[in-house]
Image (cartoon, rainbow, N blue to C red):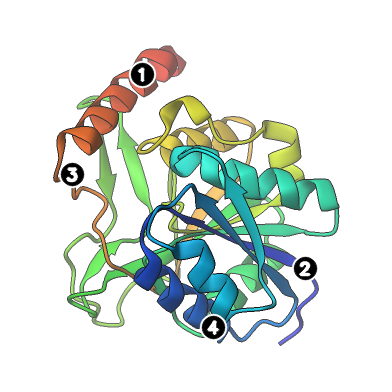
Amino acid sequence: MPQTGKVAVIICNWNKKEDLLKCIDSAKKLHYSYYDLIVVDNASSDGSVHAIKAKFSDLIVLENETNKGGSGGFNTGMRYALKKNVYQYLYLLDNDIILAENALCKLTTYLEANPQVAIGGSTIYSMDRPTEIQEMGASINWDSFSIKPNYKGLTDNSNLPETVECDYVPACSMLVRADVIQEVGLMDEGNFIYWDDIEWGYRIKKAGYKVVALSASKVWHKMGAAAKVNTFGTYYFWRNRVHFFVKYYDDQ
């Protein structure tokens, strides 16, 4: 398969050493050779940086002095990659993702053939229930001020559509055109976590581009998008949700 677009694969990590090592192992098995692997660590205290440096000698490791959250962590990696000016695409991954070997090939091939698409996302399956879909992109419901993940809870029966045009795809497996990021800007670091990928996807759509999820690009995710198990996560989820709709509701 032709591989014409160089990719910066960016993994954001905070205190998930064992998951991170598995994610990197998975990424290094991708059927795509034209990429660099960048790990951004958000000041982990669990030995993540030491572990990956000891096991992998060919990674680019960027260490934030403080925990900048998902948006700040990804932005650190994206700033580094964009400054190099050699990457056509940036591929964002959470640290608790396992990828199918062709996950990246499917995304790059589709974006190469569809220049109006700025973001391509994978179909995300549950790590614990490997045939159950967490989501295949999602839509924003402006009436109920909520989001609706596509095909959530469906057991994959191979009847999924090839693509779904959507409002956003999760940044746990998101391929983005570098030139569009230069045009539209990075993630809003004020979000810290939650709704950062939603706001970014919507902002990129507002700029005239499409966001698409592909059924052929598969990844498995350890954590569900709605798994808010502590006050910290719940606070950011609801705060950022309110901020999003206050900011953009008048667009409708």
Tell me which residue sits at (29%, 55%) in the image. Answer: 150
Amino acid bearing label 2: Gly
Mark 2 or mark 3, earlier in chain: 2
Mark 1 or mark 3, earlier in chain: 3
Tell me which residue sits at (72%, 55%) in the image. Answer: 115
- Residue position marked by numbered label 3 in the rendering: 228
Is residue 216 visible in the rendered image? The answer is no
Give the CA distance from mark 1 to mark 4: 37 Å
Give the CA distance from mark 1 to mark 2: 35 Å
Of the numbered discs in the image, which one, if any, rests on residue 243? 1
Give the CA distance from mark 2 to mark 4: 15 Å
Estimate the x, y position of residue 181 in percent, counting from the top left.
69, 41
The secondary structure type at the circle numbered 3 is loop
Pointer 1 with pointer 4, Cβ within 8 A? no
- Residue position marked by numbered label 4 in the rendering: 102
Mark 1 or mark 2, earlier in chain: 2
Amino acid bearing label 4: Asn
The secondary structure type at the circle numbered 1 is helix
